[in-house]
């Protein structure tokens, strides 16, 4: 009987420890541009806000980004990125990555999910994946779309990490497009 009670107590503590290790990213987060290292395509971001909700099974990210006027200019004849973001936006337009404008919902069980994003030329299939590792969260998103210049694939990988106080969120982001790969480190503060 003592062994059974001991096993029950150990199981309870291990379950509590595993639950406690899962970081909670919920809240409203505002980009601190002065502490961030933005890539060349997202340098013209004036402001960015993330509204994050989290349950045991999913993470929902609603993002709003404001670009300077220079970012919104697109040369005549150039294709516009999905969501109407401007040239040089580096995928920061609506739906172009976890930090693009719009809403993205990730399953937190580590399995890939497939969803459709409504782009200017119809639905674009996306593959999403989230995996929590202690205080870090790894998010990935990939989509392939047809454009006037042919098929284009955009993939984004992010690692989210909360500061010790829970009021700072650092997002290390790598985005690969036909133009190449760009990396950014974005620092957000909790409102």
Image (tube, rainbow, N blue to C red):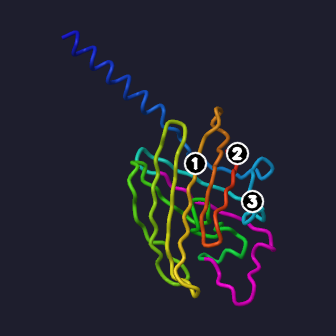
Which structural element holds mark 1?
strand
- With 73 as the anchor, is 118 left or right in this view? left
Q: Are marks 2 and 3 in contact (CB under 8 Å)?
A: no
User: Depth-wise, is mark 2 or mark 1 nearer the camera?
Assistant: 1
Question: Counting residues from the N terminus, which is met first, the one under dot 2 or under dot 1?
Answer: 1
Decide: few, some or many residues near mark 2? Use Cα within 10 Å; few <14, some 14-19, many ≥20: some
* Residue 47, label in figure: 3
Quick one: SS at disc 2?
strand
Which residue is at a point 61% across and 40% down the rendered structure image?
162
Extent of the magenta region? 59-81
Residue 66 in the magenta stretch? The answer is: yes
Which residue in the structure is indicated by mark 1? Answer: 159
Q: Which residue is mark 2?
A: 189
Relative to 122, residue 107 above or below: above
Q: CA distance from mark 2 to mark 1?
A: 16 Å
Quarter-of-image position of residue 78: bottom right
Residue 24's disc is: none
Q: Which of these two is toward me, 45 or 138?
A: 138
Q: Nearer the viewer, residue 127 or 9?
A: 127
Question: Label 2 to label 3, Cα distance in Å?
Answer: 12 Å
The secondary element bearing badge 3 is classed as strand
- Percent across and percent down for residue 104 are 51, 61
Marks 1 and 3: which is nearer the front? 1
Q: Is residue 154 left or right of residue 38?
A: left
Residue plotted at (28% across, 14% down): 6
Quarter the N terminus occupies: top left
What residue sits 65% from the left and 33% below the top?
A: 165
Q: Is residue 178 above or below residue 59?
A: below
Q: Cα distance, mark 1 to mark 3? A: 20 Å
**Residue farthest along the bottom direction in this orientation:** 77
Residue lying furthest left: 1
């Amino acid at each position: 009987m003592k062994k059974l009670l001991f096993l029950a107590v150990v199981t309870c503590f291990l379950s509590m420890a595993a639950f406690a290790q899962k970081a909670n990213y919920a809240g409203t987060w505002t980009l601190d541009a002065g502490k961030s290292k933005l890539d060349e395509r997202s340098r013209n971001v004036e402001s960015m806000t993330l509204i994050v909700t989290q349950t045991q099974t999913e993470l929902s990210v609603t993002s709003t980004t404001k670009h300077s006027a220079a970012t919104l200019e697109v040369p005549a004849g150039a294709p516009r990125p999905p969501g109407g973001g401007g040239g040089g936006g580096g995928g920061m337009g609506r739906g172009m990555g976890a930090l693009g404008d719009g809403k993205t919902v990730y399953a937190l069980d580590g399995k890939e999910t497939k969803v459709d994003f409504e782009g200017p030329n119809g639905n674009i299939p996306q593959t999403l994946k989230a995996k929590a590792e202690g205080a870090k969260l790894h998010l990935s998103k990939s989509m392939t779309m047809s454009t006037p210049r042919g098929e284009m694939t955009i993939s984004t990988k992010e690692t989210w990490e909360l500061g010790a106080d829970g009021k700072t969120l650092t997002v290390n982001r790598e985005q690969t497009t036909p133009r190449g790969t760009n990396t950014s480190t974005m620092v957000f503060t909790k409102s």
